[in-house]
Structures are given as C-alpha cells and as structure tokens.
Image: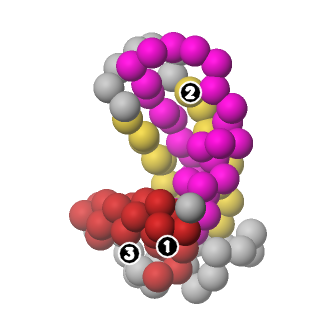
Amino acid sequence: MHGEKKRWQDVLERYLLMARLPRPLPHFLTVDCLMVFPRLHRRDEGNFKSPLEKALGDALVNGQWLPDDTPRWWEFQGLRFSEERGPNTTILTLDYRRESDR
C-alpha cells in the first residue's frame, strides 16, 4: 500500500512541476477532483479520495508548494465521478486565489 501511495505521490509531483505552480503557493489551496472511467458503474468515493488526498498532500509538501498538509494550508474539497464514459482520467483543479479574488 505504501509503495502505491509513493508512486502516486511521485506522479503528482511531476505534474505539479509541469504546471509551474508558484512555490510556495501564495494563498490557501483548494482542490477538486473529477475522475473518468471507461465503464459507468457505482464506485465508492472513499476508495479513491483518501489515497489521492494523501499522495497529493505529501507531494505538495515535498515539492515545497505548502509548508504542511494540514487544513490550515489546504483542503481537498471533493471528488466526483464523471457521468460520461472515457479513458481513465483524473482531473485535479487547484485553486490558490485569495478568497476576495474568487
């Protein structure tokens, strides 16, 4: 289990680098996730959200985008499953604007 989390953390960290996020992030971070699958059927959100949230939080700290992966610095707000079929895809939306800019 730890090996899989570390693999996801490494993948997420590479994508965060490619996105050229400022380091450290200037404001509180909120994250939303949309997952797309080739087949539509019922899925347990917790089976996906918890490991993804942990791997992303650790990637954000390891890459120095956040000083800590606690609620003071970020929130993984939600995970949704697409109602449309498609290739396995995970879309993360990171919002680090100030509350007044939203």
* Residues shaded magenta: 29-57
Residue 79 in the magenta stretch? The answer is no
Dot 3, crowdedness within 10 Å: few (<14), some or many (≥20)?
A: few
From the viewer's perspective, is the residue at label 2 or at label 3 nearer? 2
Query: From this viewpoint, is residue 29 visible?
Result: no
C-alpha gap between disc 3 and disc 1: 11 Å
Residue 35 in the magenta stretch? The answer is yes
Apparent side of residue 98 relative to residue 85 in the rendered image (left or right): right
User: Element at badge 1?
Assistant: helix
Residues under numbered marks 3 and 1 in contact, where contact means CB atoms less than 8 Å apart: no
Where residue 48 is drawn, which disc sits there? none
Residue at the spot x=37%, y=35% of the render? 89
Chain-order first, disc 3 or disc 1: 3
The residue depicted at 60 percent of the width and 32 percent of the height is 80
- Contact (Cβ within 8 Å) of mark 1 with mark 2: no
Name the residue carrying label 1. Answer: 60
The image shows a total of numbered marks equal to 3
Q: From the image, tell me which residue sits under label 3.
A: 22
Q: Residue 4: percent from the left, percent from the top?
A: 47, 60
Q: Is residue 66 above or below residue 2?
A: below
Q: Quadrant of residue 33?
A: top right
Q: Position of residue 21 (x, y in %)?
A: 36, 69
C-alpha distance separating marks 1 and 2: 23 Å
Horizontally, residue 86 falls left or right of residue 62, namely left
Decide: is 26 above or below 48: below
Q: How is the image coloured?
A: secondary structure
